[in-house]
Image: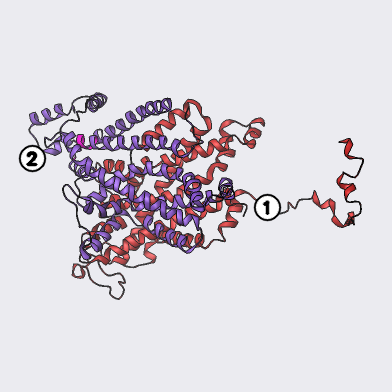
Chain colours: A purple, B red
């Protein structure tokens, strides 16, 4: 097991290097001069522009820039934003909020998705199954931001059940609606995945054996059907964490949350390359680690998988 | 077993007093056993899937949606004579439905019905084009990785991992903000350049499971080259999961385009698109919530059509359900 973890971590290194190089390449070698754009219509004096370029290593060749940036990442020095704040402070402010939002969305979609999918899969073809399936299709087909607006308008503005926006340092209540919106599409996917998987496993030989040896229905469903059905679901949830982080850009925009997504969006629009790169790197690292965790979770769920 | 031949223990002997009924040999027609009716067309995986598919109402519903949306995207002028950009009258801003204008008017006083009709083209173009690119790139990379294995597989798989690690909407946002004059083709290319990883992974797995079949060994023993085996024998048999995913991916790309347009990083305002109209309608959601409904509804219906089609095709191609 330890050797397996070691090998997987080593495999992550080229992925991390490649992904950060790709992000760095996208942000910095695109046409347009971020420094010149800083001055607005009047333009910056030549010396000021040169100093800024030197500060951000923009006068170096691309590969050197990237290596200097990597050195910064390793020593946790992400540089400063164009407005003079340490990037790491910006990240430290934004990350906990997004993390809370992401975890709430993940719990929401996992618990509700697996439960609904389980009941639908056990009674495949029934009324409950059909209803849940149609609703889930609609949730997938309607873009997240539309769901966001509609919920915000009806639940927040008209019914006043939940706060309309979150603002700074949001509590559980004000994050509840954004988390539901953020997790809605993934909830539909989790539900459908669980349903298919449960319906398939319900007819498996080992389930018949378990029933035949006199286990109660509850135990058969919990231990034999559900546990085996969760393997594809867990894979999806791991990969989905990345989508949640990206989806947070939209959701945090709608509900005015100062998280990674909102900060990232403002940085992209403002052309703050170094902030964009740093925030994106953080998201990619979270994503890579989540997928590593999923790989390790397999062993707990599927006894056939043994890591040598 | 010689000891069973004597005594009363052999099964035949035990039933000595039972009556036996024999069918006449010429009645059973033993000769017919070896004769297989091969006059009909051979039942391939595809023809069998098609037979199952055409019995499902969900297939016909989704096919109808897809055909209608495609016709609307190709020939919008067949459905409305109103120009979605020019025939606007600010006096009609947020006007209610009127004769000839069943959906009413948006903020600029443009006819919402004609904008919804004309918006189909942008979404369908982005969806179809991005999916086509993704199939070509992803299936090629996945097939080569899965079929040739070894170091080629390692390199291509790591490459896939790298692109997989960057969420598609995030990458698209970073790239799109650089370009100022955007169009549907560019949006499709950007979405596809980060959206091919799933197809590559699916194809790789599918090819790896197919390539060890006997018919591949047979083709090789007949002297067929590796490249033509991959194209002629492996890929057609590995195509089912790729087709299923591609149908779903088309819907996902359409939603992604709308999301980019919503962030004003997608199509510019002079191209009529559902994403752009939703984004514009969102500004008035508290006063005129109904105008967001039409572009969002059209978008949802289109995506729904493709996802339901993917569902139906998957059920039809699923080997676990095929014997029923």
* Range of residues picked out in magenta: A271-277
Mark 1 chain: B
Q: Say the numbered circle drawn on residue A260.
A: none
Q: Does the magenta stretch include residue B223?
A: no
State the residue lying farthest toward the bottom: B99
- Relative depth, front residue between A118 and A74: A118
Depth order, front residue of A94/A250: A94
Q: Would residue A24 be found to the left or right of residue A212 on screen? A: left
Residue A219 place in picture, x, y as percent: 49, 49
Q: Could you tell me what secondary structure mostly forms the magenta stretch?
A: helix
Q: Is mark 1 on a helix, strand or loop?
A: loop
Q: In which quarter of the image is the N terminus of chain B?
A: top right
Q: Residue at x 75, y 53 (%)?
A: B37
Residue behind mark 1: B41
On the same chain, marks 1 and 2? The answer is no
From the viewer's side, name the closer residue of A116 and B174: A116
Q: Quadrant of the C terminus of chain B?
A: bottom right
Give SS at disc 2: loop
Q: Quadrant of residue B275?
A: bottom left
Q: Looking at the picture, how far across and down is residue A281, in whole percent?
A: 27, 34
Residue in the picture at 30% in, 57% down? A147
* Residue count near mark 1 (Cα–Cα under 10 Å), binned few <14, some 14–19, many ≥20: few
Q: Name the residue under label 2.
A: A42
Graded by Cα atoms within 10 Å as few (under 14), some (14 to 19) or many (20 or more), the crowding at tag 2 reads few
Q: How far apart are marks 1 and 2 (CA)?
A: 76 Å
The image position of residue A34, as x and y in percent, is 17, 36
């Amino acid at each position: 097991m330890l050797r397996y973890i070691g090998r997987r971590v080593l495999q992550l290194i080229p992925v991390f290097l490649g992904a950060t190089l790709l992000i760095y390449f996208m942000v910095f070698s695109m046409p347009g001069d971020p420094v010149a754009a800083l001055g607005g219509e009047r333009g910056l004096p030549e010396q000021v522009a040169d100093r800024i370029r030197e500060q951000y290593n923009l006068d170096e060749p691309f590969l050197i820039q990237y290596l200097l940036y990597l050195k910064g990442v390793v020593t946790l020095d992400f540089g400063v934003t164009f407005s003079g704040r340490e990037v790491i402070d910006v990240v430290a402010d934004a990350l906990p909020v997004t993390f809370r939002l992401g975890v709430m969305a993940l719990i929401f979609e996992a618990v509700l998705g697996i439960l609904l999918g389980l009941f639908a899969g056990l009674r495949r073809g029934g009324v409950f199954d059909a209803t849940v399936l149609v609703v889930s299709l609609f949730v997938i087909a309607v873009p997240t931001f539309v769901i966001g607006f509609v919920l915000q308008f009806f639940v927040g503005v008209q019914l006043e059940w939940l706060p309309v926006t979150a603002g700074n340092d949001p509590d559980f209540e004000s994050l509840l609606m954004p988390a539901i919106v953020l997790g809605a599409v993934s909830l539909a996917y989790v539900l459908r995945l669980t349903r298919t998987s449960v319906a398939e496993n319900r007819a498996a030989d080992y389930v018949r054996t378990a029933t035949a040896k006199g286990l109660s229905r509850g135990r058969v469903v919990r231990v034999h059907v559900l546990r085996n059905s969760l393997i594809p679901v867990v894979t999806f949830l791991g990969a989905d964490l990345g989508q949640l982080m990206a989806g947070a850009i939209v959701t945090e925009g709608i509900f005015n949350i100062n998280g990674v997504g909102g900060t990232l969006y403002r940085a992209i629009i403002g052309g703050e390359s170094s902030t964009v790169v740093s925030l994106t790197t953080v998201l990619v690292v979270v994503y890579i680690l989540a997928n590593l965790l999923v790989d390790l979770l397999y062993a707990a769920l599927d006894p056939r998988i043994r890591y040598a | 077993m010689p000891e069973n031949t004597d005594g009363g223990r052999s099964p035949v002997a035990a039933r000595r007093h039972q009556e036996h009924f024999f069918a006449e040999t010429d009645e059973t027609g033993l000769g017919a056993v070896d004769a297989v009716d091969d006059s009909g067309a051979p039942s391939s995986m595809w023809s069998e899937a098609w037979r199952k598919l055409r019995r499902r109402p969900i297939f016909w519903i989704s096919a109808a949606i897809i055909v209608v949306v495609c016709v609307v995207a190709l020939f919008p002028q067949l459905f409305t004579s109103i120009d979605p950009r020019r025939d606007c009258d600010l006096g009609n801003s947020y006007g209610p439905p009127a004769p000839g204008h069943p959906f009413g008017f948006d903020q600029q006083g443009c006819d919402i019905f004609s904008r919804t009709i004309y918006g189909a083209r942008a979404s369908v173009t982005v969806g179809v084009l991005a999916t086509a690119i993704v199939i070509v790139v992803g299936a090629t990379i996945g097939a080569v990785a899965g079929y040739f294995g070894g170091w080629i597989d390692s390199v291509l798989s790591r490459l896939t991992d790298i692109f997989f690690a960057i969420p598609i909407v995030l990458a698209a946002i970073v790239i799109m903000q650089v370009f100022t004059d955007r169009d549907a083709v560019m949006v499709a290319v950007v979405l596809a350049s980060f959206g091919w990883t799933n197809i590559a992974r699916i194809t790789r797995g599918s090819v790896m499971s197919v390539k060890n079949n006997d018919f591949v060994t047979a083709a090789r023993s007949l002297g067929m080259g590796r490249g033509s085996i991959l194209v002629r024998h492996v890929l057609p048999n590995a195509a089912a999961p790729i087709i299923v995913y591609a149908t779903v991916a088309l819907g996902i790309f359409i939603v992604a385009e709308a999301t980019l347009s919503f962030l004003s990083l997608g199509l510019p305002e002079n191209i009529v698109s559902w994403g752009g109209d939703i984004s514009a309608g969102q500004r008035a959601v508290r006063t005129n919530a109904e105008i967001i409904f039409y572009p969002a509804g059209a978008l949802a219906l289109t995506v729904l059509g493709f996802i339901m089609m993917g569902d139906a095709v998957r059920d039809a191609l699923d080997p676990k359900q095929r014997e029923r």
